[in-house]
Image: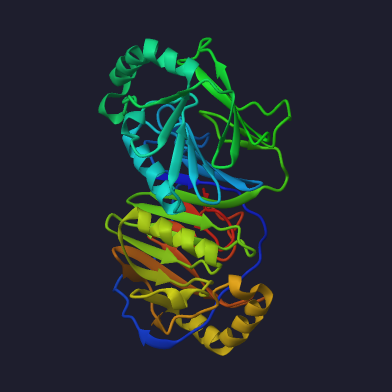
Amino acid sequence: MKKSIVLVIVALLALTMAACSGTNEEMAPNEETSKQATTEESNMDEEISDEVSENGEEVYEPVEQFITHQMGDIRVHSYVSNDPMNDVSHIIETERSLILIDLQAFHGKQDIFNRYIEALGKPVTHTLIGFHAFGSGKINDTELIISEELGIYLAESGQEMQTKFAEMFGDELDTSLSNDFKFTTEKRMEIDGVNFEFNYVPAAGRVTAGTEMIINDVIKYAHDVNSADGNYNLYLGTHEAPVNTLEESVTETITINEIDDLRIHTYVSSDPMNDASHLIETQDSIIAIDLQAFYPKQVFFNNYINSIGKKFDTVVIGFHAFGSGDIEDKTILIDKALNAYLEENGTEMQAKFAEMFGESLNTSFADKFIVVSENPVEIDGVKFEFMSVPAEGMVTDGMNMVINDVIYYSHDIPEEDENYALYLGTHQSSVAK
């Protein structure tokens, strides 16, 4: 079965990029022969609802998404969990801190949400409860804020809700409620420089009452996303992906697809070149395809890798090698033809891109690449088949890949090709077919 996780965050701009060479060694391939791949499709992490398309094939729906929008001085991260209740949690990121709005209650989703928070590298100072308070019993190191009206409602109905949901979902669901809420009667509050306006909403047919919020006068948080009024730039909900009414918005996206026993993380950085990097996660390890070269994006990407908590030993260069000079104690694999191209043109490329982007871009190259001259190669139990691609109008030569016969990586994702389950590109989010 294939599943997927999509951490979306919308991005703009598309150029190209790569980088250079170093000392070369040969890596012996395994003895498997290359095969043409056939596949299905997928998109995310969790139990997926399997549907059937008109032609009778299985259709795998996305299982989770992280969506991040830049709104003035703050970034708004939304985690659409696609858990059995499709709960959505939000993170308001300021220059120095994180403010959470609503929590995740299913244990597996809590772990994923917490890892993402860790990757952001900033402290959580406050958690605001709008509609979802389950899981708050685990919160003990931040200030938990709840409206007085919602606090009264939970005092009256919380235990009944806990019993009801525990019967429905058993040990999968964390129904804990905090004993340390900070109740507020204020209608407006400034937290870490962010302005919040609170509006209590009675249950009125929903499972629970809640508190709607207006954030910095341009973001509306409510139980249901309703952007029809057009009064705000961003609309956040409790069970739906956010709606952005601005044409330009956005930051980065992480898409995680799960296919068979692999999880494939795609980070589209929305840096000035909109570079995409990919992680192949096995049961025990992580393999990276291409790198991030703009320094702020490198930091987040590296934090994200570390947050997964698995052995990370190998980087495969497909098209983007800038930044590889900062990779220590890793095997960095490269195609023979691509390596020759970068040996010849790498210094010129470094100078060109350094002139364009200055110190914001890491144009360093690894001192040593491992050249793979034969196919296929098995890395941590994952089969890679490499195909050299000449520049032909692109900034650099490159290397297409077929991974475990079901995943296709190339510079541009082919629109018509449907021979593989998942398509990865150098400037796009992953596409499941």
Q: Residue 144: x, y in percent?
A: 42, 31
Residue 58: image quadrant is top left
In the picture shown, does residue 115 fall above or below 368? above
**Which quadrant does the N terminus fall into?**
top left
In the picture shown, does residue 219 fall above or below 407? above
Q: Residue 136: x, y in percent?
A: 36, 30
Q: Is residue 58 visible?
A: no
| Front in this rendered view, residue 389 or 106 | 106
In the picture shown, does residue 272 fall above or below 130? below
Q: Residue 191: x, y in percent?
A: 54, 37
Total labels drawn: 0
Query: Residue shown at 42%/56% (left/top)?
Result: 304
Query: Residue shown at 41%/88% (left/top)?
Result: 23
Residue 249 falls left or right of residue 212 = right
Residue 138: image quadrant is top left
| Front in this rendered view, residue 45 or 11 | 11
In the picture shown, does residue 142 fall above or below 160? below
| Front in this rendered view, residue 118 or 164 | 118
Query: Residue shown at 59%/82% (left/top)?
Result: 350
Give the image's coloring scheme: rainbow
Residue 212: image quadrant is top right
Residue 397 falls left or right of residue 62 = right
Q: Is residue 274 visible?
A: yes
Query: Residue shown at 48%/73% (left/top)?
Result: 387
| Front in this rendered view, residue 64 or 3 | 64
